[in-house]
Image (cartoon, grey):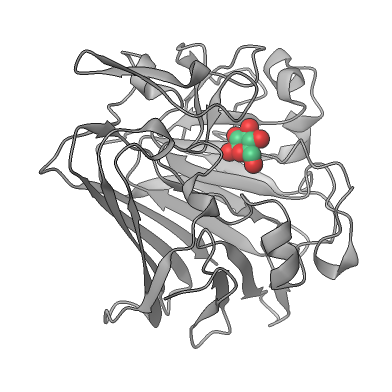
Amino acid sequence: MTKASDVFTLKNGNNVEVTFIGRGGQVTGINVPDAKGNIADVVIGYETVDAALAGDGYFGALCGRFANRIVDGKFELDGTKYQLDINNGPNHLHGGNEGFNSRTWDVEPYADAKYAQAYKLSLVSPDGDQNYPGELTISVIYGLTEENEFVIDYTAETTKATIINLTSHAYFNLKGAGTGTVENHELELNASKYTPISAELGTVTGEIADVKGTAMDFIDTKKIGEACNSDDAQVKLVDGIDHNFVISGFDGNLRIAARLTDPESGREMEVYTDQPGVQIYTGSHFDSSETGKLGAPIEKWAGVALETQIFPDSPNKENFPNAVLQPGETYKHTCVYKFI
Ligand code: BGC
């Protein structure tokens, strides 16, 4: 049986190293060399496992059953109304108070020739968990390739019709966690549209809007700080970016979602997914009250999360992608963080 504090490491031949713990499958570190071989830990977090267990439970964690927000925690499926656990103002966020990030996953080594090293993380979520219908059985492969790809491969099956949206919540800072904010990072998104939010705690309005001419336009690479420091009304609502972007050309196959570069270190990361959306979150709620890696305060905009996903509140928005999983079907989701 895996313990919450158990530590697992994936390594490849290029000195890339991914570390995670049993609780939430939380990725607590990703060491990546720059072109000169200087290694930095590129995910924000804490210096010890004890601090990770006591700290922000979403850092690097697997989120579900439904990552992101469901307005008022309500949805209807096959004529039955469900009221999910409320844990974010009036809303349901990342699966509720006892979301998958708070569970200890069962971890075992996983053999697959395409990975330098891999682990399989398993969890069974009982029928009625956080008021979701159906027993859900989830497997997540964490694999590291010799091409410096950290692959997260999700599958899940249910005993009753339910809704599902799993994601991973690491916040990246390619200069290195604890070295300042990501304002100077350059971001390029394969998204000409995004889902605007209302003033009500970041919930989507249901609109699918063009990014063109707005702060959300990352079609051509742009500094994150340029958007975060702009007067754009959507930015002002959340003091940064906390928005779902619609991946252009989505067809269920793996395609590029994002490219993030730190011009100072030269480290670069590409994100690939087969999901329709990616939530970009610049960590606006960090307030320097916690001490993170390198003994530095975890400050506002200290990292950026790129959470591949189905759109927020999809179960209540007819024009958003389907998030329903039926018995006999398999939920599949692949996310690749590739370090260059
Ligand atoms: C959401 C933020 C939320 C954060 C919690 C992100 O995925 O988009 O609004 O505050 O998770 O860690």
Q: At x 41% / y 47%, what residue is drawn?
A: 256
Q: Is residue 206 visible?
A: yes
**Quadrant of the rendered image containing residue 251:** top left
Q: Is residue 62 visible?
A: no
Q: Quadrant of the N terminus?
A: bottom left
Q: At x 74% / y 72%, what residue is drawn?
A: 48
Tell how many labels: 0
Q: Which of 27 and 308 is in front in this view?
A: 27
Q: Which of 19 and 54 is in front in this view?
A: 54
Residue 163 located left or right of residue 286 = left
Q: Give percent across and percent down for residue 77.
A: 25, 20
Q: At x 77% / y 70%, what residue is drawn?
A: 47
Ligand 1, image quadrant it occupies: top right
Q: Give percent across and percent down for residue 195.
A: 50, 20
Residue 138 located left or right of residue 8 = left
Q: Residue furthest left?
A: 328
Q: Give percent across and percent down for residue 248.
A: 38, 32
Q: Give percent across and percent down for residue 100.
A: 47, 49
Residue 147 located left or right of residue 228 = left
Q: Quadrant of the C terminus?
A: bottom right
79 lies above or below 126: above
